Image (tube, helix red, strand yellow):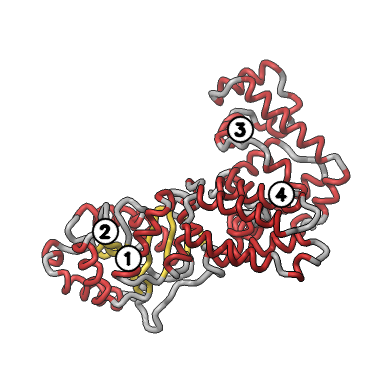
Amino acid sequence: MLEQISERLQNVMRYLRGEGKITEKNMQEALKMMRMAFLEADVNYKVVKDFEVRVKEKALDQKVLSSLSPAQQVIKIVRDELTVMLGQKEQDMNYADAPPSVFMLVGLQGTGKTTTCGKLALREMGLNHNPLMVSFDLKRPAAQEQLKTIAKAIHSSFFEFSIKQMDSPHKALEETVAYAEKNNHTPLIVDTAGRLHVDDELMDELKFVRDKLNPDEVIYIGDSMTGQDAVKSASVFEEKIGLTSIILTKLDGDARGGAALSIAAVTGKPIKFIGVGEKFDKLEVFHPDRMASRIIGMGDMLTFIEKAEKETDMKQAEELAKRMRREEFTLEDFRKQLEQIKKMGSLSQILQALPSGGVFKNINKMNIDDKKVNYFEAVINSMTSAERNNPKIINGSRRARIARGSGRPVAEVNQLLKQFFDMKKMMKKSVFKKMMSSFPLSH
């Protein structure tokens, strides 16, 4: 996620830390490096210039220059201005005083609009709400079927139009709202038509839906992989329809970050959620301050902790901490840890949440292959219970059998066992025991 811009800006931060003092000359050089990083990441030019002016003005303030750690002060200024660029602070959804609340999703075709309907519905169900999904793309019957399939997959309610209702859009909308009111559904999540390009027919159709439903949220769904195209089309939707918020999809695959870094500043509308995977639970609240910290290498430990708390079996984690302190960690424990990691997301996503310096410096330099998690899990699953609990008995013939059973080469079995025994050695060190004893889980 945003790897390209993040790596470039972290280089700028390292450059500033390496300078003994901040001067106008080295600040100009740092700003030039940042400008090039932003523009190569496809960030809107005006957004970049505004950012540059604000950072320069604050960084060259006499109070900053005369402080004990001017480089750290400038890095804080960069983080704060990045936060402003990204939208300043997270914002909750707008809900109606009298249900049902109405969320209307708009955007171009292929941006993930229909899938995002399902993600939003699942999130609302997690808040103990009773969402109702409806597809108001009446000219494309397949759109109804697609959303109906999603509703079934997440066990959400779905309102299906009949052929007769499709012929009368005005009446169809009235009946949808009446059904939601009668059955205590809120929010009503409305999927709308999309096109490959913005056209007058699409806008007229969306205006009709907006005027009849008076939605609490008009949410633009933008594909972050399209960069400035997403920003430009969002601006058109804002001008023609009026938006309240933005959800960016496919941010887990967006290495450049132009859309994420431009869209809030250009449209004046907040990014409320980001899609970070294909599964329906891969919708995250967007925290501008946390994203800014992550981009410049300060990590995003709060999001990491929230994910861990959500996905971790606390009783199991407490027992594991005790076993690690007593040096009783086995391959069975390791397998359970791999399962927890998979629930939290990819290893690369988890490592992005860690700060780039300090104790995490070498971890972040590791070449992480997410497939290894699945391979190691397959190898451990091919072992007997006795082998998992006492790996020392795994001799050459056992390794060959495990390799055959898992479909992995013997070299991979050897690699897993080496890493496991290296971990066991680390657990014997006093610094590790001290660290484990400081965890609340281990008490």
Circle count: 4
Q: Quadrant of residue 402?
A: top right
Disc with the residue nearer the chain's start (2 vs 4): 4
Classify residue 238 as left or right of residue 428: left
In screen coordinates, is 10 left or right of 324? left
Q: Looking at the image, is 65 positioned above or below residue 340?
A: below
Q: What residue type is labelled 3?
A: Phe
Residue at (43, 54) in percent of width and height: 249
First of labels 2, 3 by sequence position: 2
**Disc 3 and disc 4: Cα gap in Å?**
39 Å
Would you name the residue on which mark 3 appears?
376
The x and y percentages for residue 423 are 76, 36
Q: Mark 2 points at which residue?
A: 198
Furthest residue to the front? 25
Disc 4 target residue? 15
Q: Mark 1 points at which residue?
A: 237
Earlier-in-chain disc, 1 versus 2 = 2
Q: In the rendered image, which quarter contains the C terminus?
A: bottom right
- Which class describes the residues within 10 Å of circle 1: few (<14), some (14-19), or many (20+)? many
The numbered mark at residue 122 is none
| Separation of marks 2 and 3 at Cα, in angstroms | 47 Å
Above or below: residue 217 compared with residue 40: below
Q: Residue furthest right?
A: 430
User: CB of mark 1 within 8 Å of CB of mark 2?
Assistant: yes
